């Protein structure tokens, strides 16, 4: 008996270097990524809309040259379907130089809530697309430092800086309000111990002279040049 064997061929269509099976066509997907300063370890995506949930991934500028996988420098945790604002993305390696970065919403195509686009060689968790192209927004990110300090009570001899992020190791220095009038040196009231590059929270700074009344203090990140 003669048997006829049917040979099935699978055609993989590639769009922009990414298998189309890994991409989704979602007209309502959106992302906003504004120019910003960073301490080198995180960036903030202003808003992202994910119709079916997923991630927002940060690529360096080489993604525009076709380096789809190698350009990934960080991705958010899993985000539920909907719009999310002020999404912090931790970078895989600290950024020490300013440059252009690209925010790109990605699907959770395998449903495991773990970003695996790079590990799966682009076969899973591909980008949301519109009109055949990935949905993206670009921003200039300046590697420097960020610092924040809330209003607080104090015993007068120290203050606490809520968060400081440094692209290179350095210090956080406390100035009094005269720094805004140009008293750069005379306004210094205290400086932290040395802080390595990265994110530091609840940094206590001992003051050189006690604060005896309500006043305005200004935290400022300094390099260790």
Image (spheres, rainbow, N blue to C red):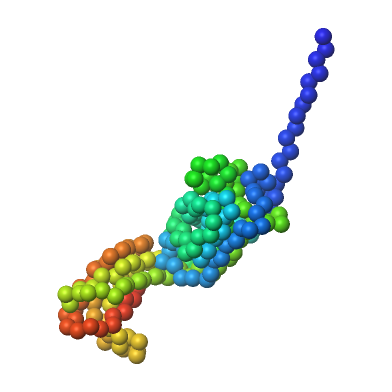
Compared with 81, 196 (above or below) is below
**Left or right for 96, reference 121:** left
Compared with 166, 128 (above or below) is above
Q: Whole-percent x and y of residue 40?
A: 43, 64
Residue furthest bottom as drawn: 181
Camera-side residue of 3 and 197: 3
Point 64% across, 48% down: residue:
23
Total numbered circles:
0
Q: Whole-percent x and y of residue 224?
A: 33, 71
Compared with 73, 194 (above or below) is below
Quarter of the N terminus within the rendering: top right
Residue furthest right as drawn: 2
Q: Whole-percent x and y of residue 108?
A: 55, 46
Res. 159 image quadrant = bottom left
Residue furthest front as drawn: 82
Camera-side residue of 139 and 214: 214
Point 75% across, 32% down: residue:
9
Compared with 135, 186 (above or below) is below
Q: Whole-percent x and y of residue 64?
A: 63, 59
Res. 158 image quadrant = bottom left
Camera-side residue of 32 and 53: 53
Residue furthest top as drawn: 1
């Amino acid at each position: 008996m003669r048997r006829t064997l049917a040979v099935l061929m699978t055609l993989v269509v590639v769009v922009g270097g990414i298998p189309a099976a890994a991409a989704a066509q979602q007209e309502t997907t959106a992302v906003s990524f504004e120019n910003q300063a960073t301490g080198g370890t995180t960036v903030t995506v202003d808003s992202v809309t994910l119709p079916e949930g997923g991630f927002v991934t940060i690529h360096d500028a080489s993604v525009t040259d076709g380096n789809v996988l190698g350009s990934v420098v960080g991705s958010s945790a899993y985000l539920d379907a909907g719009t999310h604002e002020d999404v912090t993305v931790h970078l895989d390696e600290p950024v020490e130089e300013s440059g252009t970065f690209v925010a790109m919403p990605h699907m959770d195509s395998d449903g495991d809530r773990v970003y695996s686009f790079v590990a799966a060689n682009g076969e899973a968790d591909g980008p949301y697309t519109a009109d055949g192209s990935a949905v993206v927004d670009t921003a200039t990110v300046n590697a420097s430092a960020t610092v924040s300090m809330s209003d607080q009570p104090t015993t007068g001899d120290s203050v606490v800086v809520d968060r400081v992020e440094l692209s290179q190791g350095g210090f956080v220095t406390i100035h009094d309000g005269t720094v805004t009038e140009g008293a750069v040196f005379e306004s210094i009231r205290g400086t932290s111990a040395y802080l390595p590059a990265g994110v530091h929270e609840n940094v206590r700074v001992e003051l050189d002279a006690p604060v005896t009344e309500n006043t305005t203090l200004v935290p400022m990140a300094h390099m260790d040049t």
